[in-house]
């Protein structure tokens, strides 16, 4: 299962060329960023072992206060929201240096969750008692665009879009009466999509690749499954955490969940149906966001002469064709990544014999937007960007 959004309409006009980072090991990402709310910092971990490396964003750097979410910007830097801040903070993803406020033109009130969508805008929820509409900023400049939702969402958290482009927003409530609200493509409230009851304190939302809406509930310490069309409750997906908030997927489809109260990050393996402790070091206190980032390894000139990778058509609608041409046998994994650096689909993991190989990759289940087709091998790595668009 991957964190696909299900919307399939509109052109994602993001004109950014991603400088994504890829590991020479095609099966593993290199770094993991985890917010540590109560130390006012962001911590860096080794992906392979889950071991602590350092505070990449030092406690209180740039006056960061009560971080809520870490996001990898397509240009490669980190964006961090903090409940105690009135703007989204910007940091160098390698050194952790504070680069100033990213957002401007609007004073945020307790910003929480952020999402990049297909319209090249950054969506931000607010926790504030009176100012709590979902706000949009230009992704390139950080300049305020508008208050998108006509109605506020008190204690607002995560976002997701359905296949028709309607915006769903998690409303934590007071932790006992949480719900999921639904807004149309113009930001008009159309009603409650999932009411309080089974839900207590929802914080994160995403659509699974079968169309189910997946909700992380902080109060229950569980990840729950709902019908993505009707909102009807299906059942639990993951249980056994104290207070869950923050999620990510790796290239093998494993789910990573922060446990806010347990001060840990867990890894859930779908194939084995097992939940195991992944991170529990580095002085992590109240983690609530996790980002898995691929690592940079330059492709040598000799490797570039040996292998080429091309995608067509661009933009693509239902299917994109990835053509790999190699002069020698290589072993590698072909996969797709989105603008945040997350792997959204593993296409093939195999030996590639000399010659030309064209694979047709279905885009079903992916939102319109910018993606990269990546081949990571034992000889180097290659990638090509393309836009997925609606019909």
Image (spheres, rainbow, N blue to C red):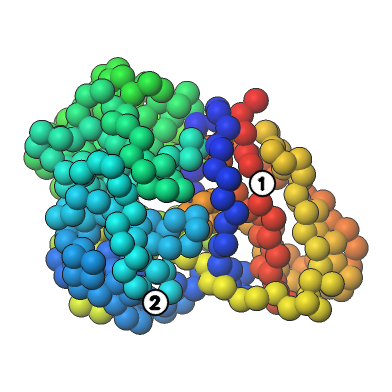
Secondary structure found at label 2: loop
Task: Judge whether 141 appears above or below 7 on screen.
Answer: below
- What residue would you read off at disc 1? 386
Left or right of 97 in this view: 293: right
Crowd tier of the residue under label 1, counting other residues whose Cα lies within 10 Å: few below 14, some 14–19, many 20 or above: some
Picture coordinates of residue 282 (x, y %)? Answer: 25, 79
- Please state the horizontal and vertical placement of residue 111, each as a whole percent of the image: 22, 47
Query: Left or right: where does residue 251 sit relative to residue 379?
Result: left
- Picture coordinates of residue 324, whole percent (x, y): 80, 59
Say how many tags the image has.
2
Q: Which residue is mark 2?
A: 95
The residue depicted at 66 percent of the width and 46 percent of the height is 386
Along the line of sight, the residue nearer the viewer: 9 or 376 = 9
What is the C-alpha distance between the residues marked 2 and 1? 29 Å
Element carrying mark 1: strand
Q: Which mark is residue 238?
A: none
Is there any visible trace of residue 176 in the rendered image? no
Disc 2 vs disc 1: which is toward the camera? 2
Viewer can see residue 102: yes
Within 10 Å of the Cα at label 2, are there few (<14), some (14-19), or many (20+) other Cα atoms?
few
Q: Residue at image x 56%, y 50%?
A: 16
The one nearer the camera, 141 or 312, is: 141
The first of marks 2 and 1 along the sequence is 2
The residue shown at (80%, 63%) is 308
Dividing the picture into quadrants, the one containing residue 236 is top left
For the residue pair 313 and 96, the one nearer the viewer reads as 96
Q: Quadrant of residue 146?
A: top left
């Amino acid at each position: 299962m991957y964190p696909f959004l299900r919307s399939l309409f509109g052109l994602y006009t993001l004109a950014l060329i991603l400088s994504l980072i890829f590991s020479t090991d095609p099966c593993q990402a290199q770094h993991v960023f985890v917010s540590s709310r109560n130390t006012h910092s962001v911590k860096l971990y080794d992906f392979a072992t889950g071991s602590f490396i350092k505070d990449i964003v030092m406690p209180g750097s740039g006056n960061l206060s009560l971080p809520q979410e870490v996001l990898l910007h397509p240009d490669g830097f980190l964006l961090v929201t903090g409940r105690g801040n009135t703007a989204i903070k910007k940091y160098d993803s390698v050194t952790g240096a504070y680069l100033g406020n990213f957002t401007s033109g609007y004073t945020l009130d307790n910003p929480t969750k952020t999402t990049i969508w297909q319209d090249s805008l950054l969506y931000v929820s607010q926790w504030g008692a009176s100012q709590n509409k979902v706000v949009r900023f230009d992704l390139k400049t950080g300049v305020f665009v508008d208050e998108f939702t006509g109605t506020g969402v008190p204690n607002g958290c995560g976002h997701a879009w359905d296949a028709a482009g309607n915006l769903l927003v998690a409303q934590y409530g007071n932790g006992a009466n949480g719900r999921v609200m639904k807004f149309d493509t113009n930001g008009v409230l159309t009603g409650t999509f999932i009411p309080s009851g089974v839900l207590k304190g929802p914080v994160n939302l995403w659509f699974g690749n079968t169309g189910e809406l997946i909700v992380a509930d902080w109060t229950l310490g569980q990840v729950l499954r709902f019908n993505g069309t009707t909102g009807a409750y299906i059942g639990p997906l993951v249980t056994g955490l104290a207070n869950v908030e923050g999620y990510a997927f790796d290239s093998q489809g494993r789910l990573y969940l922060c446990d806010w109260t347990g001060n840990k990050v867990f890894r859930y393996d779908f194939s084995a149906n097992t939940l195991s402790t992944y991170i529990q070091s580095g002085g992590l206190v109240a983690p609530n966001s996790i980002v898995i980032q691929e690592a940079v390894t330059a492709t040598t000139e000799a490797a570039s002469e040996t292998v080429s990778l091309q995608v067509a058509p661009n933009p693509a609608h239902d299917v994109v064709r990835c053509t790999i041409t190699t002069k020698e046998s290589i072993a590698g994994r072909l996969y797709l990544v989105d603008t945040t650096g997350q792997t959204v689909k593993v296409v093939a993991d195999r030996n590639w014999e000399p010659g030309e190989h064209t694979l047709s990759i279905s885009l079903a289940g992916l939102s319109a937007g910018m993606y990269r087709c990546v081949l990571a091998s034992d000889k180097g790595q290659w990638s090509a960007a393309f836009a997925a668009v609606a019909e």
